[in-house]
Amino acid sequence: TRVWRGTQHFSIDGLQVVIPERRTYITNASGTFDPAVIVHMIGPAVAHVMKPYHFKTPPTARVNGYVPMGNPHDADVVFEGGGGEFESLNFRVSQYTAKVIWKNNLLTATNAGGNFYGGQAGGWAHFVFPDLEHAQFAFGVNVTNARLPALVADVTQKTNNLDGFLRHIRHQEIGRAH
């Protein structure tokens, strides 16, 4: 089966909606499609979690597993792929790849990497959603050769007179969000 939406498209070997289980099973889906459309179909709780993540160009991905029709803590799906412009939390990347695993109330992004302010960044993130209002997280990132002026301007949302490169930084963080 092939689905088109303007220039966006995906193909899928299997799609099964199981109403009693309130799940949609996806087998070998691949293509280039705006995640906001798919997230909206999954439901408002997932749309709320994804709100800070902006895909300026639709990514190309492969998807397998099942997504819930209601309870966002009932999922088992893997997304693998990448794309062009992406931004979140005042950071921007021009090209990226990642693998995202959503298993019940756990979300893991691994093998993430891409172009980052003229340099490269790579890392991972792990989120636990104990309920719909809270999250626990841990992440690690490695950055090399990023241009400081553009990076600091985006993070602070202010102009600056910095010059130079961030040659290498490794950071890990653990925290909670409400």
Image (cartoon, rainbow, N blue to C red):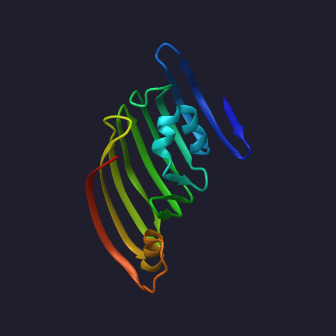
Query: As displayed, is residue 57 above or below residue 47?
Result: below
Question: What's the residue at 30%, 70% (across, down)?
Answer: 169
Q: Quadrant of residue 30?
A: top right
Q: Is residue 21 above or below residue 53?
A: above
Q: Residue drawn at (53%, 32%), measured in percent from left and top?
A: 42
Q: Decide if residue 37 is on the left or right side of residue 43.
A: right
Q: Nearer the viewer, residue 34 or 177?
A: 177
Q: Nearer the viewer, residue 31 or 54?
A: 54
Residue 64 in picture, x, y percent from top left = 48, 33
Q: Is residue 122 left or right of residue 115?
A: left
What is the quadrant of the N terminus in the image? top right
Residue toward you, 113 or 18: 18
Q: Residue 109, how many percent across, how many down?
A: 38, 47
Residue 135: x %, y % from top left: 33, 43
Residue 67 rendering spot, x and y as whole percentages: 48, 29
Number of numbered discs overlaid on the protein picture: 0
Q: Residue furthest right?
A: 6
Q: Is residue 85 left or right of residue 110?
A: right
* Observer-nearest of 95 and 56: 56
Is residue 12 placed above or below 154 in the rendered structure?
above
